[in-house]
Image: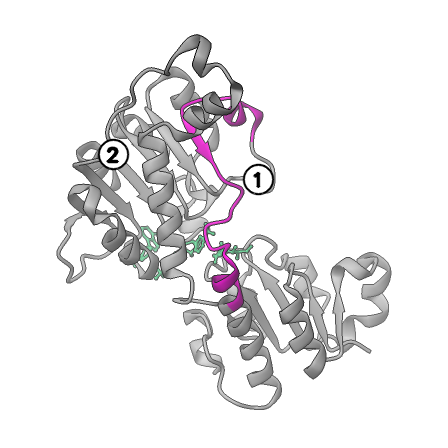
């Protein structure tokens, strides 16, 4: 009988800790359609992640589920309305990844302006000697940088990217007490800035917030950096804007249909592409894993949860 069902990829260290405390099954080791009918009633704990989430119909098949631990800060893959209605708290892994994700955002920012993906391919291709250098790219220095989602990570990005900024701006639903310029519409900020950095949560409220109009407002000399969620950007509009030059370039870590990156994007030279690895260092994934496991152990031992999501506040 398994009390813990793990549907996320986990590190060996996480697995060791989990197996020392829980009767555990990993979804990779079973045929879920065969396993679930016989074992669903015993599942009290689920460990998932931002990319995998927990589909509504899956949740409905776990009648005795007590808690969902999400390995990652973004939990748009879990329906917190449904979970809360059933009295199931959800936990996530805030703060421990702020600096790592900010570092990735800065690296994407620099790589995009200085055309590093194309430059690196050029160096490896052996064509430098015969063809000389690629055309000069624009500088990354002195840019007006707009952050969509100035939260925990957004603030870390603003601090880390400051050496390259002539001005840092932000858009969110509320003005904050920060030394950055607030815009009360995304369109106005996109028109003002050279680069838009998205680090807002996914989900319905931000779905396709970055649409064709916003991409046009960023403009042919502007760049988009997306380390938030793929769902926030209308990917078809992004491909079109990059193809026509309406948008100058993009640095992307996240996509609408992960792990699939559209071929059109993969073939473009004005984009820098990463496979959703903004938090993916050994140290940061260890910290995230520890927190995700600590939440499950705390629940099992009847102690307070360490990092419940705000929607679960009434349950803990
Ligand atoms: P956070 O502290 O909750 O910050 C979220 C920010 O987004 C807040 O400033 C909030 O400001 C703004 N926001 C929320 N809803 C919005 C809306 N509908 N329209 C405009 N702005 C909105 O979250 P965080 O810890 O910084 O994480 C942010 C997100 O980054 C996560 O949810 C996740 O999706 C993504 N992420 C991605 C990776 C990766 O590997 N690529 C890693 C970690 C996190 P207001 O409330 O004022 O609107
Ligand atoms: C994780 C993330 O890689 O924290 C998040 O929201 O997107 C990333 O840090 C993700 O949860 C794993 O799928």
Indicate the position of residue 110 as horizontal and vertical percent values. 32, 37
Q: Nearer the viewer, residue 163 or 238?
A: 163
Identity of the residue drawn at 81% across and 65% down: 36
In this view, 90 is above or below 203: below
Image coordinates of residue 183 in percent, x first then y, are 17, 46
86 left or right, relative to 182: right
- Left or right of 180, for residue 93: right
In the picture provided, is 276 more to the left or to the right than 65? left
The mark closer to the camera, 1 or 2, is: 2
Q: Which residue is mark 1?
A: 257
* Residue carrying label 2: 140
Q: CA separation, marks 1 and 2? A: 30 Å
Q: Quadrant of residue 310?
A: bottom left
Q: Secondary structure at mark 2?
A: loop
* 193 in relation to 310, above or below: above
Establish whether ligand 2 lies closer than 8 Å to the Cβ of label 1. no
Within-10-Å neighbours for mark 1: few <14, some 14–19, many 20+ = few
| Disc on the earlier residue, 1 or 2 | 2
Task: Report the label total.
Answer: 2
CB at disc 2 and ligand 1 closer than 8 Å: no
Q: Is residue 237 visible?
A: no
Q: Is residue 270 magenta?
A: yes
Query: Which residue is the extreme one toward the top?
Result: 130
Mark 1 and mark 2 residues within 8 Å of each other at the beta carbon: no
Q: Which residues are magenta?
A: 262-286
């Amino acid at each position: 009988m398994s009390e813990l069902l793990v549907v996320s990829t986990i590190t060996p260290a996480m697995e060791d800790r989990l197996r020392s405390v829980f009767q555990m099954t990993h979804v990779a080791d079973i045929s879920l359609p065969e396993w679930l009918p016989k074992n669903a009633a015993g599942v009290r704990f689920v460990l998932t992640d931002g990319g995998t989430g927990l589909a509504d119909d899956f949740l409905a098949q776990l009648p005795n589920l007590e808690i969902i631990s999400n390995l990652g800060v973004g939990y748009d893959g879990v329906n917190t309305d449904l979970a809360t209605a059933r009295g199931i708290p959800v936990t996530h892994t805030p703060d421990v990844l702020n600096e790592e994700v900010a570092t990735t955002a800065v690296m994407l920012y620099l790589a995009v302006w200085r055309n590093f993906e194309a430059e690196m391919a050029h160096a490896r291709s052996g064509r430098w000697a015969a063809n000389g250098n690629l055309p000069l790219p624009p500088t990354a220095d002195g840019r007006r940088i707009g952050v969509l989602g100035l939260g925990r990570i957004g603030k870390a990005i603003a601090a880390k990217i400051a050496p390259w900024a002539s001005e840092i701006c932000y858009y969110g639903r509320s003005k904050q007490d920060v030394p950055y310029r607030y815009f009360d519409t995304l369109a106005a900020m996109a028109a003002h800035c050279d680069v838009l950095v998205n680090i807002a949560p996914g989900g319905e409220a931000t779905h396709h917030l970055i649409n064709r109009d916003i991409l046009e407002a960023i403009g042919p000399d502007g760049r988009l950096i997306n380390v938030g969620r793929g769902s926030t950007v209308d990917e078809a509009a992004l491909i079109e804007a990059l193809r026509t030059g309406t948008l100058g370039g993009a640095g992307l870590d996240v996509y609408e249909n992960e792990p699939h990156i559209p071929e059109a994007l993969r073939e473009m030279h004005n984009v820098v592409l990463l496979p959703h690895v903004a938090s993916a260092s050994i140290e940061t994934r260890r910290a995230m894993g520890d927190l995700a496991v600590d939440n499950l152990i705390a629940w099992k031992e009847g102690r307070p949860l360490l990092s419940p999501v705000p929607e679960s506040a009434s349950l803990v």
